[in-house]
Amino acid sequence: MRICVVGAGAIGGMMAARLAVAGLDVSVIARGEHLEAIRRDGLRLVELDGTETVASGLDASDDFGALGTHDAVILALKAHQIAAVAHELGRLCDDGTMIVPVQNGIGWWYFQRHGGHHDGRRLEALDPDGVLAAAIDAAQIVACIAYPAAEKTAPGVITHVEGDRFPVGELDGTKSERAKALGEALTSAGFKSRVLTDIRSHLWVKAWGNLAFNPISALTGATLAGICRTPATRELAAQMMTEAGRIAEALGVRIRVSVEQRIAGAEAVGEHKTSMLQDSEAGRPLELDPLVGVFVELGEITGVPTPAISTVYGLASLLNRRLGA
């Protein structure tokens, strides 16, 4: 399988490095010092036990037209960065190419091939101008949920922090041959991957935690452990997740873990900085609408009140403005 990873940062870099070392034909889209380091030294991955692997000889570029077409294009950019490159993705694809979004939060594709009451609905918080819907054919999308945590610790260097699960699934719930092939490729790279028939239900478990922990961490500077072990922020996270759980129920989604189980899982990760805290500390705009703002919109769509979510979203929006968003 020929795979291009667009955005070889923390998660994308970990995926690219492992897939390449496993023997798959992998190329990456990157930029700046990170791209230069990958070209010069290869893409280095520091694993949980401290061992290092290097994916050398990767076809790496910042030019979408320089890499040819692929069987799968993994979109590992932050969700708010995809629109800027959406018009370039066609240069990596042919008619049979899978587009594999690997973002935090609710995907812009959520109601595409949904089959429910809201089938085809565009989420304004995620695709306000319809750029993504126009540029990316929903029929090409195979969704993927990233459970691991990783950090880009230096140009060309990715450090694996926790987790190894990357479940995949078709938007219409079928177990297609292409989804099976993608899952097998990820498994061959040492990840745990399986094809789900209810990808949205599993997406909610991940998005549920990101909704609460990411903005609270950016606003307070606290790690996951700090948030979960401080009564006030633990309770705030629980309130936000409870509101989101009611939205999920209104959409017919069954979240398979409790609020307390999800918080306990985050606490167990320990002193990890969320992606939003990492962005805040680096002075980068936050991935705010895909992780938080979309839940305000979904609350309006379903008629579910979101006082805690809306308050935290408002506070984080002010921080985001200061960061140049």
Image: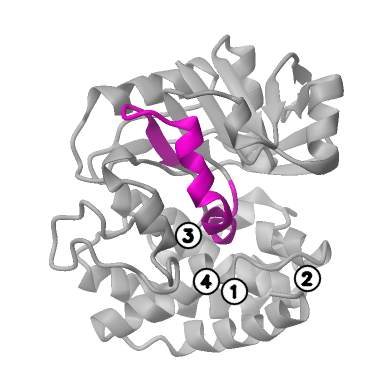
Q: Does the residue at mark 4 contact the one at mark 1 (Cβ under 8 Å)? A: no
Q: CA distance from mark 2 to mark 3?
A: 20 Å
Q: Which mark is residue 221?
A: 2
Secondary structure, mark 2, is loop
Looking at the rendered structure, the kind of residue marked 1 is Arg
Q: Position of residue 27 (x, y in %)?
A: 61, 24
Residue 184 lies in the magenta-colored region:
no
In the displayed structure image, the side of residue 255 where residue 223 appears, left or right: right
Task: Check disc 1 and report the residue beneath it.
Answer: 234
Q: CA distance from mark 3 to mark 1?
A: 20 Å
Label 2 CA crowd tier, 10 Å (few <14, some 14–19, many 20+): some
Which region is colored magenta? 77-100
Task: Check disc 3 and report the residue beneath it.
Answer: 105
Looking at the rendered structure, the kind of residue marked 3 is Gly
Q: Position of residue 99 (x, y in %)?
A: 41, 38
Looking at the rendered structure, the kind of residue marked 4 is Asp
Secondary structure, mark 4, is helix
